[in-house]
Amino acid sequence: MSHAELLDLARSVATQAAELAARRRREGVAVADRKTSSVDVVTHADRESEQLIRSLLADARPADGFLGEESAATGGSSGLTWVVDPIDGTVNYLYGIPHYAVSVAVVEGEPDPSTWRAIAGAVVNLGANETYTGMIGGGSFLNGHPLRVAESVDLSEALVATGFSYLQEVRAEQGRVVAELLPQVRDIRRMGTASLDLCMVAAGRVDAYFEQGLNPWDHAAGALIAREAGATVKGRGDNAEGKDFILAAEPTVALLVDAALARLDA
């Protein structure tokens, strides 16, 4: 299967899961469980969406591996792994805020952001009727229209997105960093869906995005889409993005935000 065919599959599967999630949202959402804290919830729709994605991918690509948020990871023999967030932005979804997405990416190598090579990905937000796609070497798109990061700006003019952990002690430190960063930038945005934050960097809707504590499924597709739109996507220093840290921005802006966060010991 070519990279383009893998992208078509990612888009199709993500769209079908997003349609299911939207239908369940209209019917009413129930919390199924809690994860890292009492406010970190899982809905029955999260699990149903992942089951659908897993089934569709198993039918189409039975030799591939699978890494999702809500079920056990499985290896494969093809060298490819599908990395899936069945509903990213579950709290938005729970409250009926139309800013959540289904994220589906396919990567080459182990399902580890520090070593994998992302091939293709799709992030679907039916609440806004938006489908973001990206393919390695093939650019990134929003509803079929090419994306490009915003032009470089000074730090004082940068609109910066971020997100917060569900763990109280981590949130307190993140709050300190944001409070000290806020006077240095145009403004801060916290929208609650990491995959869409990365796509908004790609679309030039924010100048930068940073966060710590993300899991691979949170950023697998979004990071590829941002890169293909011209963004630098990185971890701390020379490290690749991962659970420790992720930063995405136009390359010059990335340097400015990185330096500012280093000064704040973020």
Image (cartoon, rainbow, N blue to C red):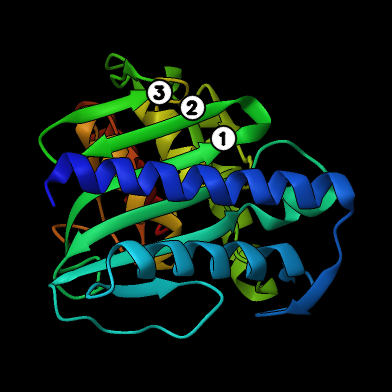
User: Which residue in the protein does label 1 denote?
Assistant: 182
User: Which residue in the protein does label 2 denote?
Assistant: 185
User: Which residue in the protein does label 3 denote?
Assistant: 142
CA gap, disc 1 to disc 2?
6 Å
Give coordinates of residue 96: x percent, y percent: 82, 43
Q: Residues within 10 Å of mark 3 (few under 14, many from 20)?
A: some
Q: Amino acid at mark 1?
A: Leu
> Depth check: 259 or 96 in front?
96
Mark before the other along the chain sequence, 3 or 2: 3
165, above or below 87, in the image = below
Q: Amino acid at mark 2?
A: Val
Q: Nearer the viewer, mark 3 or mark 2?
A: 3
> Depth check: 191 or 102 in front?
102
At 32% from the left and 64% from the top, the residue drawn is 82
Quarter of the figure with residue 51 = bottom right
Q: Amino acid at mark 3?
A: Leu
Disc 1 vs disc 2: Cβ atoms closer than 8 Å?
yes
CA gap, disc 1 to disc 3?
29 Å
Direction from residue 141 to residue 37 in the image, left or right: right
90, above or below 79, in the image = above
At 19% from the left and 57% from the top, the residue drawn is 237
> Depth check: 187 or 106 in front?
106
Give coordinates of residue 197: x percent, y percent: 49, 39
Mark before the other along the chain sequence, 1 or 3: 3
Locate the C terminus and report the quarter of the image it occupies. bottom left
Q: SS of the residue at dot 1?
A: helix
Direction from residue 47 to residue 235 in the image, left or right: left
24, above or below 8, in the image = below
Q: SS of the residue at dot 3?
A: strand
**Residue 39 tag number:** none
Q: SS of the residue at dot 2?
A: loop
Give coordinates of residue 49: x percent, y percent: 61, 61
